[in-house]
Structure formats: structure tokens, C-alpha cells
Amino acid sequence: MKVKELINAVNSGQYDENLKAVYVTDSAVELQKPRYVQALEEFGALFGTDREVNIISAPGRTEICGNHTDHNNGKVVAASINLDAIAVVSKNDDRIIRVKSKGHKINVVELSDMEPDEARYGDSTSLVKGVAAGIKNLGFEIGGFDAFTMNDVMGGSGLSSSAAFEVLIGSVLNYLFNSGKISAVDIAKVAQYSENVFFGKPCGLLDQMASSVGSVVNIDFKSVKEPVIKKIDFDFTKTGYSLCIVDTGGNHSDLTDDYAAVRNEMESVAKALGKNVLREITYEEFFNAIPVLKDKVNDRAILRAIHYYNENRRVDECVAALENGDFEGFKSIILESGFSSYMLNQNVYTPKNPTEQKISLALAISEELLKGKGAWRVHGGGFAGTIQAFVPNDMLDKYKKTIEGVFGEGSCYVLIIRPVGGYQVI
């Protein structure tokens, strides 16, 4: 369908069921329709209205359990969310990829040049090129296309806006040139490859995998090359609770060392015991070695290792609770995870600036409001940024009003867990 025809079709409700398959509720569909129309109009203004187009979506993600475990080959529970990146796309015959994202410069990639360039590290064009190169390396087809994208996954929120963009580009190539045959796992691996090799960022695989696979997933990274992924059949909309992400507005600058220290300290424990990562050592071996370890590594490293082992156990318990429909048990596990991150992993504020503790404040306020009723924990990498809360629906207005009174209007995002990952909507 061409641009103007598709605008009319979206406005008339012809694709409401397609949208509902992604965004779950009727109210969410009505919110998305003007956004889709805007993206179509922007595409038409850039590339012409006389083009056959499709619309593809890739979601942000939320980490539910498994805080700072993936980098030591651990376990996580994560979920895709209703905030997403969308692309209006059309094939071209130029062997050139052009991606114009709202508010950003256009990315132009010539498919004759598929080599990484260190001089272009940190450039979003490199992400696009890397995804195309990764798909080609797997033996799948690539080709030229023009795209206009919009991304409502907030940057710096811990909801993985960059992974959503990478998975979006991979999904475009998948649906336009490969009839959707590339697996969600391979799309995620390609996205990570792009970020590592072409963008110059040594990220793990969690964000891309949760975005690409979709729904609620349990991921075991014991083998990073072949992670074990299991979808969890659980409908959060039937619990009577809402999932909230609170953006505390903390300063994200100069936190690279803090994030790196979590991984490095966990690995220092493993290396003191002759291994590379904690997953290669049993909890019993680690715990029995603490008298020796205390003279080889710093105290915080041992505390963070304790967090790692217990968090892996909690992930298994979380999966069991959800599969058994035990939401009360699930909430208890989330609270344990949050307290462990606070006290053992110590990633709720940076020791470089101990008087700025916005995450700690958000957790404390959440406890005052939700104790005995809901659950709350640090979300994502920590040190600054966001917390996660499961809030009873009858308390949602009060919670949102109180939180936004402290952290500003719009700081509390009420999310829906979406059932699909990278997906061709239209």
C-alpha cells in the first residue's frame, strides 16, 4: 500500500487489530494511530508518497529479575514493553540504506562497504551498517531501503532505546528481504555484533535478546554463544497491578567506571579461584573459599559475588512463581532482588557522589507507599536512572502523583508488557 492510502487506512481503523496485536489495549491503539500517521507523513515528505511501504516495530525492554548477572554468564527474566521504535520502510534499487530518525541526521550506508571503521565508532550509521553486515555474514539477503523511524523508548532510562533501534533495523532487513525467516535469536546476536564491532561498545546480549524475542522471557547465558531462551506464559494484565518505571533524573555522566567495576569485581573473584566468570564456579565452592578470598580481592567484590549467586537463584524462583501463577511469591522475589542490589551489589548510587541518591530516594518513597502491597527495585545498570515498581491498580493514581511530585511530571511511566518482539505491524 502506498503512503497516502496507508494513512487513510490507519485513520479509518483498518489496521486496528494489527496494532492491538502489538500494543495490547484499545486505548493504546488509539494513542499509536496518530504516531503511525505522523511517521507515514514524514516518510512521504522525505522519500515521496508514491512508494509502497510497510511499518515495522521493535520494543524497548524491562529487566524483571537478574540484576547485573548476564555479564558473568548468569540468568535473567526480562520483557518487551509497549514503548518501541517504529520504521516506515520501502525497498529501493540503489543498494543503499537510508535511515532518517526523527530528530537525528540521516544515516546512509552503501552496501558495497560492509567493513567496520574505528573512526566511526559511536556513530548511529555504524549501527545500521553493522546490522546489515551481520545479517549478510549469516548468509541471508540484504538490500537497499529507505526508512523514517521514530523511537519513544526514552534514552538513558534503562529501557534500551539503542537495542530497540538495532533490532528494528534487523527486523526491517528480515521482513523486506528474507520473508521473516531470520530467527529472533539471530537478530539479537546481529544487533549485539553491530554494537560491539561497528559501534565500539562492548555490550552484553540481554537488551537485544529481550527486544527481539518479545513477551516475558527467561534467558540463561551459561553459553553466551548459544543462550537458552524460554518464553514465560504469564499475563500481567490480569494481576490487578501495573508495571511502573520511574525516571529519577539522576546524572548519568561519568558512570562508566561504576558499571565496569561491578563486572570486574565479580570476575576478580572468579579469577582468584582460577576461572574467568562466576558461572564457572559453584556457590558452595565460592562460599567455602571466602576465608581465602578476603585476602585476594576487596570486600565489595565478595558482596557482589554473593549477590550474583543469590540473584541467579532468584531468577529460577521468579520463573517458577510466574509459571505457577503465584504473583504474591513473585512480588517477594522482586523485593529480595531489590534489597540485594541495594545492599550487596551496591548499584543504587555512585560512591563518587554519595550525597546524590535519587534512586535511593525513589526506592524509599516506594517502600513507604507500597510496603505490604507492591514491589520495587532498582532497574537496569543502576547508579543513576530508573527504578521499577509493581503497583496495585487502586493505588496507581496516588503512587504516580506522589512520585511525580518529587521527580517531576512525566517521570512515572506506566508500561504494558507486549507479546511480540521485532514485528511487521503493517
Image (cartoon, helix red, strand yellow):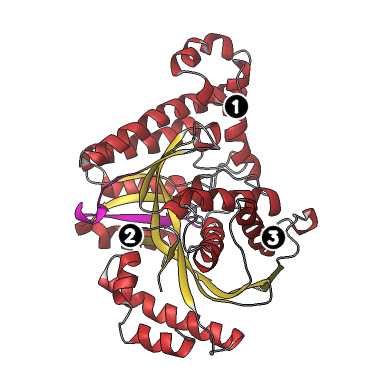
Residue 380 vertical placement versus 7 (above, below) = above
Q: Which quadrant would the C terminus be assigned to in this image?
A: bottom left
Give how far apart the Cα atoms at labels 2 and 1 are.
Answer: 35 Å
The answer to whether marks 3 and 2 mark residues whose Cβ atoms lie closer than 8 Å is no
Find numbered disc 1 in the image and state the secondary structure of the residue it sits on.
Answer: helix
**Which amino acid does the dot numbered 3 rest on?**
Ser
Residue found at x 62% / y 12%:
295
Q: Which residue is mark 1?
A: 267
Q: What crowding class fits label 3: few (fewer than 14 Cα within 10 Å), some (14-19), or many (20 or more)?
A: many
Q: Which residue is mark 3?
A: 126
Q: What crowding class fits label 1: few (fewer than 14 Cα within 10 Å), some (14-19), or many (20 or more)?
A: many
Which x, y percent locates residue 117? 78, 56
Q: Is residue 12 left or right of residue 117?
A: left
Q: Earlier in the sequence, mark 1 or mark 3?
A: 3
**Which amino acid does the dot numbered 1 rest on?**
Glu
Residue found at x 34% / y 71%:
19
Viewer-side label of 3, 2: 3
- Residue 135 or residue 408, whichever sits in front: 135
The range drawn in magenta is 231-249
**Which amino acid does the dot numbered 2 rest on?**
Ile
Residue 111 vertical placement versus 5 (above, below) = above
Tag count in the figure?
A: 3
Residue 241 vertical placement versus 262 (above, below) = below
Q: Where, by quadrant of the figure, is residue 376 drawn?
A: top left
Viewer-side label of 1, 3: 3
Q: Earlier in the sequence, mark 2 or mark 1?
A: 1
Residue found at x 52% / y 13%:
290
Q: Where, by quadrant of the figure, is residue 360 drawn?
A: top left
Q: Which residue is mark 2?
A: 416
